[in-house]
């Protein structure tokens, strides 16, 4: 665990309390190999199996930053041990709803070139009783929390419309909802007006039904959403991050990194954005911090803050620009 006090800043309304929602968690089976032999046998150099899912990854980084994290969503009872161990290790409050069956196992194949191939399975079936219990839990947590991170895909039994209804309910209670999903879930969820979204270029192009093009096209697409979403953060890989808020664009570009794995880099960015807002950082420092945190993530295997010293160095090297409309 890193020295958490380093990341606390002064502020009257700052908070460390946050809820992360992972509706469709997964055990990630990650294999590292020279290259994939399509249609044949691929030999893995090393592998690991660990509790994951986008919201779980966000929770891990937030906990390492010093957040008081509560985790919720749906977990299969048959293989929950690794999740329980992780939550205990993080000191996170476990409010996951248990459902019958096994939480899915996703496969990630990381080639030496840095290319990652994901094989994602559907997830455990969520029953009507579990949905009722989850919504009750969510609204109960709203009594003592202002920040909610809803991240990842939807499991069988949870429609995009139902997910959007939870965003609406939290927003009606004046909660800040950070929503990080894709495809139909993102398209329907945006209409519920979450406080912040973080699509990458591909997700934004799918959402706006435009070809995946350059930063200029991403800007134009994001600006069309600004009447629905207060904060739109577009992650562009090695080209950095763009953030639209109150009609102003900021762009952050980290130094060139030696990529080991991009798995979890987007989740790390979400955690950095959330923590920066919770700690009331000014906009420039916040984007610089979150972008550096995400850049650091690609230099390692697994999600977490490996080197505090390297993070501080990356913050100083991350360029921030105000870009015109």
Image (cartoon, rainbow, N blue to C red):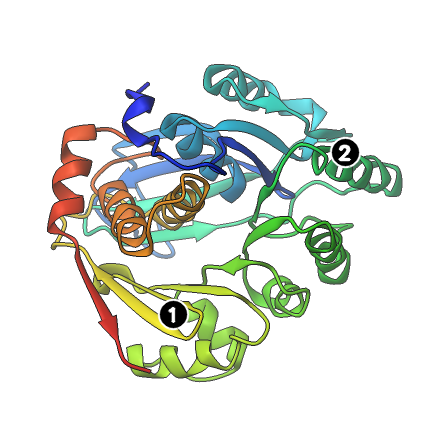
Query: Which quarter of the rendered picture does the N terminus lie within?
Result: top left
Instruction: Quickly name the residue at label 2.
Output: 140
Task: Kindly state the secondary structure of the residue where label 2 is placed.
Answer: helix
Of residues 115 and 231, the one drawn nearer to the viewer in this rendering: 231
Alpha-carbon span between mark 2 and mark 1: 35 Å
Q: Is residue 214 visible?
A: no
Residue in the image at 68% along x and 55% along y = 171
Give x and y (percent) for residue 43. Answer: 29, 39
Q: Which mark is residue 201?
A: 1
In the picture as drawn, the residue positioned furthest to the right comes out as 129
Residue 172 lies left or right of residue 38; in this view the side is: right
Residue 128 lies left or right of residue 144; in this view the side is: right
Of residues 46 and 317, the one drawn nearer to the viewer in this rendering: 317
Residue in the image at 59% along x and 52% along y = 153
Question: Is residue 113 depicted above or below 141 in this figure?
Answer: below
Question: Is residue 39 depicted above or below 71 in this figure?
Answer: below
Task: Kindly state the secondary structure of the residue where label 1 is placed.
Answer: helix
């Amino acid at each position: 665990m890193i020295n958490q006090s380093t990341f606390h800043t002064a502020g009257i309304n700052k908070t460390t309390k946050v809820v992360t929602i992972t509706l469709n968690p997964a055990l990630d089976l990650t294999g590292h190999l020279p290259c994939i032999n399509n249609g044949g046998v691929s030999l893995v150099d090393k592998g690991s199996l660990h509790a994951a899912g986008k919201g779980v990854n966000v929770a891990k980084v937030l906990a390492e930053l010093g957040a008081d994290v509560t985790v919720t969503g749906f977990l299969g009872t048959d293989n929950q041990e690794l999740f329980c161990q992780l939550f205990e290790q993080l000191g996170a409050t476990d409010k996951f709803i248990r459902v019958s069956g096994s939480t899915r196992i996703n496969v990630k194949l990381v080639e030496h070139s840095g290319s990652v191939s994901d094989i994602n399975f559907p997830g455990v079936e969520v029953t009507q009783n579990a949905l009722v219990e989850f919504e009750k839990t969510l609204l109960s947590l709203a009594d003592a929390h202002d920040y909610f991170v809803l991240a990842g895909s939807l499991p069988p039994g949870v429609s995009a419309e139902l997910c959007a209804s939870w965003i609406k309910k939290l927003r009606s209670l004046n909660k800040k909802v950070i929503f990080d999903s894709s495809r139909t879930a993102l398209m329907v969820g945006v209409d519920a007006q979450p406080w912040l979204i973080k699509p990458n270029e591909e997700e934004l192009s799918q959402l706006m039904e435009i070809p995946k093009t350059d930063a200029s096209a991403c800007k134009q697409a994001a600006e069309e959403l600004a009447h629905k979403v207060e904060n739109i953060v577009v992650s562009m890989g090695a080209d950095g991050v763009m953030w639209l808020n109150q009609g102003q664009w900021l762009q952050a570009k980290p130094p060139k990194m030696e990529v080991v794995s991009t798995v979890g880099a987007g989740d790390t960015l979400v955690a950095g954005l959330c923590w920066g807002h919770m700690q009331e950082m000014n906009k420039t420092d916040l984007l610089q911090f979150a972008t550096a945190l995400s850049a650091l993530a690609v230099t390692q295997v697994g999600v977490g803050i490996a080197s505090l010293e390297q993070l501080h160095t990356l913050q100083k090297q991350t360029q921030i620009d105000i870009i015109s409309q």
